[in-house]
Amino acid sequence: MKALCWHGTGDIRCETVPDPTIEDARDVIIKVTSCAICGSDLHLYGGFVPGMKSGDVMGHETMGEVVAVGPGAAHKLKVGDRVVVPFVMSCGECRQCKWENYSLCERSNPNGALQIPQIGYQTAGLFGYSHTYGGFAGGQAEYLRVPYADVGPIKVPDGLTDDQVLFLSDIFPTGYMAAENANIQRGDTVLVFGCGPVGQFAIRSAFMLGAERVIAVDRVPERLALAAQSGAETLDYTAGELQDRIRSMTGGLGPDSVIEAVGLESHGEGGGIAGMVETLQTKLTSTERPYAFQQAVLACRPGGTISLPGVFIANVTTPMGAFVGKGLTLKSGQTHVQKYLKPLMQKIVDGEIDPSFLITHKIGLEDGPDAYKMFQEKKDGCIKVVINPFA
């Protein structure tokens, strides 16, 4: 089969690799009808994530048609079912899964011991996201093996297109959980750093959860325009002292919560404490650039909440004096996708949201390497790339 494979920093290739096979009773194989390039794939593309090996198949936003079923998944799925596959693998049986903390599954990552020196304990396996997270092949391919298929995939109701449901695999639940973690009360003002795909879903989710105002921060005109179409007020962080403008827009009070949807590759104009911290961080490491997180800490009102769906790999410097002094709450984590699949699918069925609003580019697998470069460089108005392997 054809697949997009990692061969080093900035080196993605469309290659022929072996077809996947059933390896465990709970596996299924799907024919991939749609997949997507995620912002967190760019961390792999940029060489920031340890544990990648040459030839690893990329991708964790995937859906398709079931073509083979292991006996342990036959009670849930059959050949011909259309399914969306969560990027997180979960056994459904460990204590974390029973607590609905699916991204913290204690069993699904066979390489969990590799995580312990870095984060202290193992967490769930992920599709296409390094050998530290299990070494599982990703879904930017013609076919995908899906472990724990009796727990993960959700069937797609008749009448819904791939474009409407594909993002249930990651970014829609990620944006929604980020908004949920922000402790939004009806009438609140929410600030969102980053208007990429997760940020866009966080904006819409914040409104769904009762926010009166959402202020969206970015520098890319197309992203800011899309945020405005969702009802957000927008700020270009390069157009003047950011914290002054945030205070001005909130009557000097600050937003009730802040969603930081950028993560380790953020960068900015600096300024104040955050600018000094960013300069120091750049001297210490070339990977983590926590400008958005630092600005989020400064921006949030006293007693407020910061929600952090943005991905970090190593250590970052934090304006801890501001964090403690203001009594802030921080909530973070990989998305517990399985927890959100049914309720968010229902929102799509009910017409409350059509996630296809995000798509700007559709390509075949052969165009994948160029699309990675375009997405990273934010060219051609690129916000979200969807790949149709058999188109």
Image: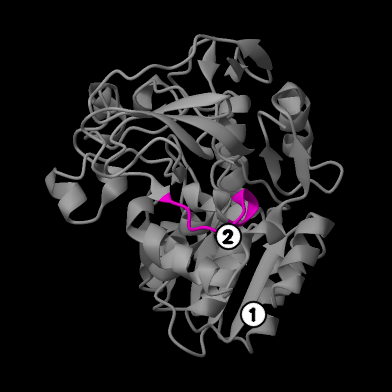
The residue beneath circle 2 is 159
Most common SS among magenta residues: loop
* Residue 119 spot, x, y in % from top left: 29, 35
- Dot 1 amino acid type: Arg
Question: For the residue carrying disc 2, how many other residues have a C-alpha within 10 Å: few (<14), some (14-19), or many (20+)?
Answer: few
- Dot 2 amino acid type: Gly
* Mark positioned earlier in the residue sequence (2 or 1): 2
Query: What residue appears at the point 37 percent right and 41 percent down from the top-left corner?
Result: 88
Asked whether the viewer can see residue 173, the reply is yes
* Residue 274 spot, x, y in % from top left: 59, 55
The numbered disc on residue 111 is: none
- Magenta region, residue range: 155-164
Foreground residue, 323 or 361? 361
Q: How many marks?
A: 2
The residue beneath circle 1 is 247
* 257 versus 10 height, above or below: below
Foreground residue, 93 or 101? 93
Disc 2 and disc 1: Cα gap in Å? 46 Å
In the figure, is residue 356 to the left or right of 54? Answer: right
Which mark is in front, 2 or 1?
2
Query: What residue appears at the point 47 percent right and 41 percent down from the top-left corner?
Result: 312
Question: For the residue carrying disc 1, how many other residues have a C-alpha within 10 Å: few (<14), some (14-19), or many (20+)?
Answer: some
Foreground residue, 181 or 314? 181
